Structures are given as C-alpha cells and as structure tokens.
Image: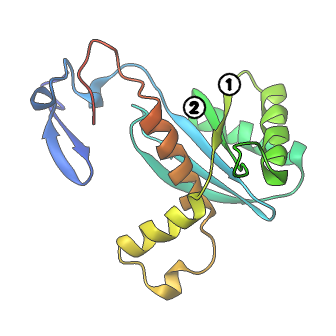
Amino acid sequence: KDQQYPYFLNGGRWFHYQNWGLKQSPCTRNENLRILGIDPGEKNIGIAISDISATLARPLMVMPHSSRKGDAQRIVELAEKEKVTKIVVGQATDVDGKPNFSGRKAARLAAEIRSSSSIPVELWDESFSTQQAVKSKIKFGSSRKNRRGHLDETAAAVILQSYLDMNPTANPDEKNSL
C-alpha cells in the first residue's frame, strides 16, 4: 500500500515518506485522527477540521449561532458526519490566563457538547486567533475586500492548528515532525 502512495503533501510541497524517517506514508495510515476545531462567537461559530493524520487544519464552515443547546447539537451532528475523534473548542482568556466572559460561554458550549456526545471535547486557548487569521489572509494575498466579513472559520483553523502543533499525535517511535 505504501508503494501506491509514497509521497505526501506538506506546506504545498510533496515529500517521500522515507526521506522524513517515517515507517509508512501518512497517506496509508489506518487510523482516523481527524479533529474538529470550534471558534464560538456571538453571532457565528467558525469550524475547522484537520486531515486524517491530525497534522494540518483547514477552515470548514461558518455556522450561525442560535442557542447553546442547538449549536451543540449541530456541532455533534457535524462531528459524527465527519467521523472526528476529538473536538477542540477555543476559549478566550484574560491576561492572567483565566477564562473571560466569552471564555466562560465557550466552556458552557463545550460542556453541552460533552453531554450530547461521547466524542472527547477539549478547551484550547484562542488568544489572538482572529488577528492571526487576518495576518494569514494578508500573507496569502487576499485583497482588502476579501478580508472583510467572516474570519470565523479561519480563526477556528488557527486555533486547531495551534492545538495540533502542541499535541503531536504521531507514534512515539516514529520521527514524524512535519
């Protein structure tokens, strides 16, 4: 099977798995490590998803906020549809690292998701995710006009990528440091 998919894409470039010291191509892994990232907001909820190896995050969609219970139910339905193994919810904190008003709302949403599903839910610091989302849109050449509007799904991808970078899921005996 590795002969069929010996190359994988990382950061826009193709690599051969053996050049990275991997025992098998990331494209042929049996396990699904897909993770959903959530950026809860007042009006909208940004949603991002990782690849099956839980290495790269990408924006998925923006969901309009309705109610905590309704939002949690729609997130759980999406998580089950996408077959994710974990949900990461962005939580805003103050300068002391304690959840602020928005962060406490995010914690309540995470608790509602936990009560509606057996999928593990983890809170993750979302500090400066929107500013990083704007910077990434600028870096990739997005015009000023295209940067207006929803940044929620991009901010969710920033939060999820931060989580993925700090929590590598590779097998400890592999030298997978993509």
Are discs 2 and 1 less than 8 Å apart at CB?
yes
Residue 22 falls left or right of residue 158 = left
Q: CA distance from mark 2 to mark 1?
A: 8 Å
User: Is residue 94 shown above or below 5?
Assistant: below
Identify which residue is drawn at 25% across, 17% down: 174
Identify which residue is drawn at 52% across, 52% down: 157
Q: Residue furthest top?
A: 173
- Mark 1 sits on what residue? 119
- SS state under label 1: loop
Q: Looking at the rendering, which quadrant does residue 73 occupy?
A: top right
Residues 99 and 29: in front is 99
Mark closer to the chain start, 2 or 1: 2
- SS state under label 2: loop
Residue 80 falls left or right of residue 129 = right
Quarter of the figure with the C terminus: top left
- Mark 2 sits on what residue? 84
Q: Residue furthest front?
A: 96
Q: Looking at the rendering, which quadrant does residue 177 occupy?
A: top left
Quarter of the figure with the N terminus: top left
Rendered location of residue 115, percent (x, y): 84, 26
What's the residue type where badge 2 is placed? Val
User: Is residue 128 shown above or below 5?
Assistant: below
Rendered location of residue 164, percent (x, y): 46, 37
Identify which residue is drawn at 56% across, 48% down: 159
User: Is residue 168 shown above or below 81?
Assistant: above
Rendered location of residue 168, percent (x, y): 41, 28
Residue 95 falls left or right of residue 99 = left
Q: Which mark is residue 91?
A: none
What's the residue type where badge 1 is placed? Ile
How many numbered tags mark residues here?
Answer: 2
